[in-house]
Amino acid sequence: MAKRYFYQIKIYHFSTTAQENRLDNYLSTAYLPALHRAGIESVGVFKPIVDASKPQGEKLIYVLIPFSSKNAWFELDAKLVKDQDYQLAGAEYLAAAHNDPPYSRIETILLNAFEKSPEPNLPVLTTTKKDRVYELRSYESPTEKLAANKIRMFNTGDEIGLFKRLGFNAVFYGEVVAGSTMPNLMYMTTFNDRADRNKHWEAFGKDAQWKTLSALPEYQKNVSKNISLFLYPTDYSDI
């Protein structure tokens, strides 16, 4: 069986275009190359798909980092300190003044990969990155026991297999072990565009396997809140 991965989602909160440009430059020229040198081949960088008709609040950049083990996550910062190329390329970001920071805050979510999907997957899509829709979903549960029940629904109940059969191009499935909305799980599915996304979810809702699985008594009332975030990958994202 493949080794189960450990994921970090870093969320950069910022407010200005200048900060966004500095973050893009840091991530593309310093951080991602350093992660690659540290043995992390595929790092995802995503931005929210903005609805122009709605007022915009704080801006966000999501960075998905797949670690082959928990130790790899614990060891990363020490590797970055010793990486002189990273220190040089990221100097403008790393040495930012107190009154001119490149972000307002950094949020971190840590996740264990699901048993039935132990490794990240690169999506197979045909559109350009700017047209793609990546859907990051969070399923919150009322209690830890019910959160474990929902995870069993994905593993033992084979909800993961259903997503795979219907071609949802899932990047990862993970149990949140540190984050602000626990207990919850998160996963990311990917589509060529919004129409492709809607077509897939329509097929999912009509699928006989889903209708049977969702009606089973043992899997009732295990989700109290479902949040979907629509993202697109930056041009320098590996995923």
Image: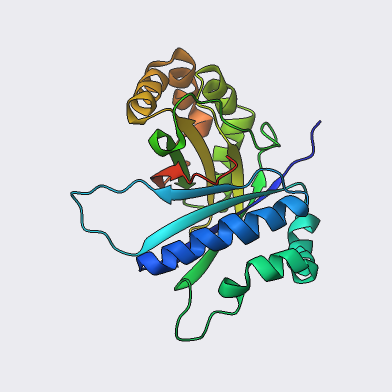
Q: Position of residue 68 (x, y in %)?
A: 76, 46
Quadrant position of the N terminus in the picture: top right
Indicate the quadrant where residue 113 lies. Answer: top right
Indicate the quadrant where residue 119 lies. Answer: top right
The residue that appears at 43% across and 42% down in the rendered structure is 232
The residue that appears at 57% across and 58% down in the rendered structure is 27
Quadrant position of the C terminus in the picture: top right
Q: Position of residue 234 (x, y in %)?
A: 48, 46
- Does residue 232 lie above or below 104 as drawn? above
Is residue 51 shown left or right of residue 62?
left
Q: Position of residue 237 (x, y in %)?
A: 55, 45
Residue positioned most to the top: 208
Is residue 20 shown left or right of residue 29?
left
Q: 62 or 222: nearer the eye? A: 62
- Does residue 45 lie above or below 156 as drawn? below
The residue that appears at 49% across and 28% down in the rendered structure is 217
- Does residue 102 lie above or below 30 as drawn? below
Q: Position of residue 86 (x, y in %)?
A: 70, 65
Q: How many marks?
A: 0
Is residue 184 shown left or right of residue 84?
left
Q: Is residue 200 visible?
A: yes
- Does residue 78 lie above or below 144 as drawn? below
Q: Is residue 11 visible?
A: no
The type of colouring in the image is rainbow
Q: 27 or 186: nearer the eye? A: 27
Is residue 163 shown left or right of residue 34?
left
